[in-house]
Amino acid sequence: MKTLIECKKGCKAKVLKLNAPKELKQRLISFGVMKEATVEVLEHAPRKSTIEVKVGKMRIALRAEEAELIEVEEI
Amino acid sequence: MSEVETKKCPVIANHIKVALVGQPNVGKSMLINSVSNAHLHVGNFSGVTVDKTEVLFDYKGYHFTVVDLPGTYAFTDYTIEERVTHSYLCAESYDLIINVVDSTNLEKNLQLTSELMSMSKDIVIALNMDDEAKKEGIFIDASYMSELLGIPCIKVSAATKSGIDNLIEAIVTQYEAPKQESKLIFSEAVEEEIAQIVSYLEKHKYKAKNSYRHVAINLLKNNKKTYEKIHDDPIWTELQPILIEASKHIELHHDSDDIKEAFAEEYASFNRGIIAEVLKQEVVEEKKTLTEKIDSVLIHPLFGIPIFLFFMWSLFQLTFELGAIPMDYIDAFFGWFGDTIGAVISNDDMRSLVVDGIIGGVGAVVLFVPNIIILFIGIALLESTGYMSRVAFLLDGFFHKFGLHGQSFIPLVTGFGCSIPAYMSARILKNDRDRLLTLFIIGFMSCGARLPVYVLFSGAFFSPEMAGNILFAIYISGAMLGLIAAKILKLTAFKGADEPFVMEMPKYRLPSAKLIWHTVLTKTMMYLKKAGTFIAAAAMLVWFLSNYPHNIELQNEYNTKIEKAVSESDKITLENSLNSKLLEQSYLGRIGKFSEPIFAPLGLDWKMSVALQAGLAAKEVVVSTLGVLYSLGSDVDEQNSSLSTIISKNIPFASAVAFIVVIMIYLPCLAASVVFTREAGGIKYFFYLLAFTSVTAYSLAFIAYNVTKMISG
Ligand SMILES: Nc1nc2c(ncn2[C@@H]2O[C@H](COP(=O)(O)OP(=O)(O)OP(=O)(O)O)[C@@H](O)[C@H]2O)c(=O)[nH]1
Ligand SMILES: [Mg+2]
C-alpha cells in the first residue's frame, strides 16, 4: 500500500482511498482529489514538508501529513 | 390614484436581487466591478473576499442589487468565510443565483454547481474567463450546456468585459420565467432509491413546497432543513427505516461510509458526462504549462526562499530610493504653502495653528505618500500575480515550526499594507486557534502607516545607500519577532494539534495595469483622506495642547530679557530657551512630563513619549506629532530645516532605536484594535493583546536601548 507522500517528483498516480477525517476528506474531494482521480506530483518543498500536486487542471499544496492520508497506486 | 400606482409599480417589479456564488478565485468580485462602477478587492488567490458586500447598479431599466459572497469550494462550513456564504444562501432572501464558474476548469467548478442545483433557486451560470479559455484552446458549447443543465449558461469575461450584456439579459429572462426543475441525473442505483422515496411521498400526499424529487434528494443527502421539517410529520416513523436502507444501498454502491462522499462522486460523474458533451479542447495541452514552468523556478526547493527574500529586499530599496525623489518637492511645496498662507494671516495664534499645526502635521504625513504608493504596488503585485500562494507554500514548512499555518501568510502579508483587512482575512483559517494566533501576531507585520516613521528615522540616521537596507531589516526583524511570538503563544496560550494544510495554487496571471492602478489608487486615496481629516484633526489637537495654556508671565519675563540682551547670539539662546520652556508648561508638555518617568528607562524624552501615545490613535499621528512638537520647540535657526535633520540632531541614536522598536511592536491603531476585538470575538482578547504587546514592546525596547548605548559607547 502506497501513499501520495511516497511518490517521487513527476510521478503520476491513481487515488484509491482517502483515509482523512471527514472534514478534510470533503475538502480534498471538492478539490477533485477523490477515488479514481489521477494526481501528479509537481514539486517538493525542502525536506518534503509540503508538496505541490496536480489534479485535473488544478494545482494544490498539501503538507506531508495530509499526503500520507491519500492512498494511491502509481501508473 | 391609479396613475401613481402604475408609475410606482414597475420600480418595484424591476428590482432584482442577485447572489453571486462560485468557487474561490473565479472572478466574482471582478465581474461585479465590470458591470458596475464598484471597486471591490480583486486578487489572484483563494479567499480575497471574506465578507458579503452589496453593490447596487442600474442596467437597462432594471435596478440590481448584487451580493458578492466569499468563494466556497463546496457547501460546507469549513472556514468562516464559507460559513458566511452558506448561511447567506440558506437564510437570506434573494431572487436569483449567479453561479460564476471558471471556464478553464469546468470539472472542478461544476461540483459546486451541482450542489446549487439542489437548492431549488433560479440559477444563471456565468462561464467566466472566456478570454483565458480561448487562449488555452478550450471551446464550450454554451447553448448545448444550457439545454443539458436546464440552466442558462452565458460566456463572459470580467477582464475584457465581453458577454456582460448577454448575462444581464439572461438574468432578466430567468427572473421573469417560471421556475424549472433541475436536470441533475444520478446513477441508476441512486435514481432507484429516489424513485422509491418519491413514490412513498406521493402515496402519503406529503405537503411540500418543492417537488418530491427535490425532497427525496435532500433527504438522502442528509440535508438538515428538510430533515427537521419532515421529522415532525406523522409519516416520519415509516419513512425513517426506508431512508436508512436507501442510504446504506448508496454507500455500498460507492464503497464508502460517507454519504457526502458518495454524492460528490455522483456529481462528479454527472459533470464528466456534461463536459464530454459540451467541451472541446482544440489545442492539445502542452506537457508543461507556463505556470508549471514558472513554478519550477519560483518554488524551487533551494532557490525559492532566497528569490522571495530578494524580491522583498528590492521592494524596500525601491521604497526608499524612488520614494525619496518626489519627497523633496512635496516638502518644498508644504514649506512654500505654509509661508504663503502664514503671510496672509495676521493673528499670531491663528497663523501658528494653520501653519505649524495643520499644514505642518498634515504635510509631515503626506510627505510619505510616494513611499506608501511603492509599498502598495508591491503588495498589489504579490496579490494579483498568483505569487502569494507560492510564498505560502514555500514558507509553510518554516511557519509550521513556529506553530503557524502556511495560509497565515496571506493575512500576514496583507498586514504589511494595513492591519484592518489583515484581521478580516484571517477568516480564511479554518481553525479558531490558528486564527486567533494569527490575529495576535498580525500587528508585528508593520503596516503602511508605520512606514513613514521608519523612513523618517532611517533617513535621519543613515546614508541614503544604507537606508533601504535598514528599512528591509526593520521589516524582516518585525516579522521574525512575530514568528517568535507565535511560537511562545503556541506553546502557552494556543496549545493544540496542527490543522491540515491544503491550498489551491492559482495559475500565474499578468495583472492589467488598470487593476494595479485601481487597487493602489483606492488605498492611496484612503491614506490621503485620512491625512486630510483624521490626521488634520489630531494635528490640531496636538497643536492646541502644546500651545495652551499661555503663560504670559514667562513670556513677559523673557521678552524683557531678550530686549536687554546685547549680542545677537544671546538673543537666539534666550528665544530658544523660551520656546522650550513654553512647550514644557503646555498641556501636552505636562502630559509628557507626567509619563516621562515610564519612558525614561527606554531613553525616550517627553516629546517622543507623547508621539508614541498619540500613535495609539493612528500610526500616522506619530510623524505629525513629532512634526508639530519639534517645529514648535526646536531651535530658531532650525525652523527651516527638514524634520529629518532636526531629529538626527536632537535624538540620540540609542533612543531612536528604542523608539522604532516600540513602534514595531506596540498596539495597532484604534480602528484596527476595534476590528481585532470583533474578529477575535470578545473584549477580553483586546486586553490580552494590550498586555502582550505592551510588555513585549517595553522589554525589547529596553534591551535595544541599552545594547545600542553600550555598542555605540
Ligand atoms: N483573464 C481573466 N482573468 C480574470 C477574469 N476574471 C477574473 N480574473 C482574474 O482572476 C482572479 C480572481 O478574481 P477575483 O474577482 O478576486 O475572484 P473572486 O471569485 O472574487 O475570488 P474570492 O473573493 O477569493 O472568492 C484575479 O486575478 C482576476 O484578475 C477574466 O474574465 N479573465
Ligand atoms: Mg472576491
Image (cartoon, coloured by chain):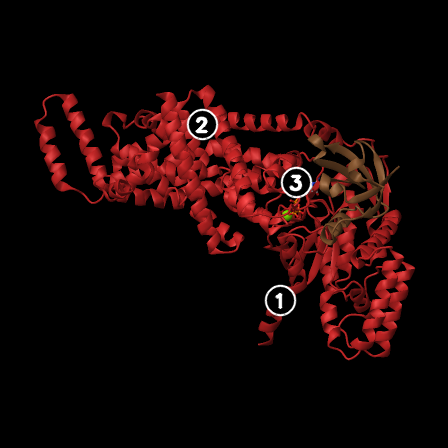
**Secondary structure state at the residue bearing disc 2:** helix
Q: Is B239 left, or right, of B685 in this rendering?
A: right
Q: Residues within 10 Å of mark 1 (few under 14, many from 20)?
A: few
C-alpha distance separating marks 1 and 3: 37 Å
- Which disc number belongs to residue B326? 2
Q: Disc 3 residue type?
A: Asn
Answer yes or no: is residue A41 visible.
yes
- Disc 2 crowd, CA 10 A, few/some/many (<14, 14-19, 20+): some
Judge left or right: residue B161 versus residue B381. Answer: right
Residue B375 vs residue B308, the one in the foreground: B308
Query: Ligand 1 sits in which quadrant?
Result: top right
Residue at point 85%, 38% (across, down): A13
Confirm whether residue B93 shows in the render: no
Q: Nearer the N terminus, badge 1 or badge 3? A: 1
Q: Quadrant of residue B18?
A: bottom right
Earlier-in-chain disc, 3 versus 2: 3
On screen, B620 above or below B15? above
Residue B12's disc number = 1
The quarter of the picture where the C terminus of chain B appears is: top left
* Dot placed on the residue nearer the N-terminal end, 2 or 1: 1
Query: Where residue B44 is drawn, which disc sits there?
Result: 3
The image quarter containing residue B602 is top left
Marks 1/3 same chain: yes
Q: Secondary structure at mark 3?
A: loop
Task: Give the Cα distance between marks 2 and 1.
Answer: 52 Å
Letter of the chain shown brown in the rendering: A
